[in-house]
Amino acid sequence: MSVALTRGVLFVHSAPTALCPHVEWAIGSVVDKRTDLEWTPQPAAPGMFRAELSWTGTPGTGAQLASALRGWAHLRYEVTEEPSQGVDGGRWSHTPELGIFHATTDVHGNIMVSEDRIRYAYESGAGDPSAVYHELSLALGEAWDEELEPFRHAAEGAPVRWLHQVG
């Protein structure tokens, strides 16, 4: 019986020099393999570094990577996981100011907002369109996108490594 696999990308948008080896160790603890990332200066945050890692692993690897990196001060990152057989995709975004955000994604990477979350937005808005807008903005992770966008653009043309999970 074959094991279902998925793939995704870890974008470390900014990390101070002292944190870079700890990020690699955290990734290695998830994929059970030593990881040496190619760190490059992050133009959007002088003194910080960035790296990207494309990975292949079992469904849930994206959540494990996001959890392993969560909570470190001065670290901005995103993890994506593509949908696989019977499993939705996901995106995790983290900033020091906002913490972590998770969204379920479709095959094209679009965020899918559940019926319950939309109902909550309507109910909590109680007829106030600005309150409904605010709740839907939270459901889409707009604050995380706004904060991470300058770091994403600064990464265009950066090198990417592929990593395949062992085991």
Image (cartoon, grey):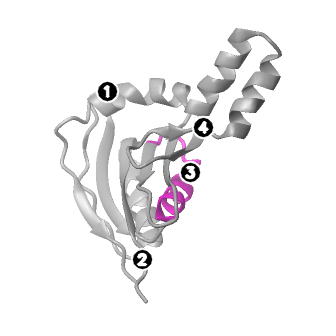
The tag on residue 57 is none
* Residue 44 spot, x, y in % from top left: 31, 27
- Residue at the location (40% across, 71% down)? 5
| Quadrant of residue 96 within the rendered picture | top right
Can you see residue 128?
yes
Q: How many marks?
A: 4
How far, Cα to Cα, is label 2 from label 3? 18 Å
Q: Are discs 4 and 3 less than 8 Å apart at CB?
A: no
Q: Which residue is mark 1?
A: 44
Assign the N terminus to one quadrant of the image. bottom left
How far, Cα to Cα, is label 4 from label 3? 23 Å
Q: Secondary structure under badge 3?
A: loop
* Residue 130 spot, x, y in % from top left: 69, 10
Mark 4 or mark 3: which comes first in sequence? 3
Residue stretch in magenta: 60-76
Mark 1 or mark 3: which comes first in sequence? 1
For residue 127, side relative to residue 49 (left or right):
right
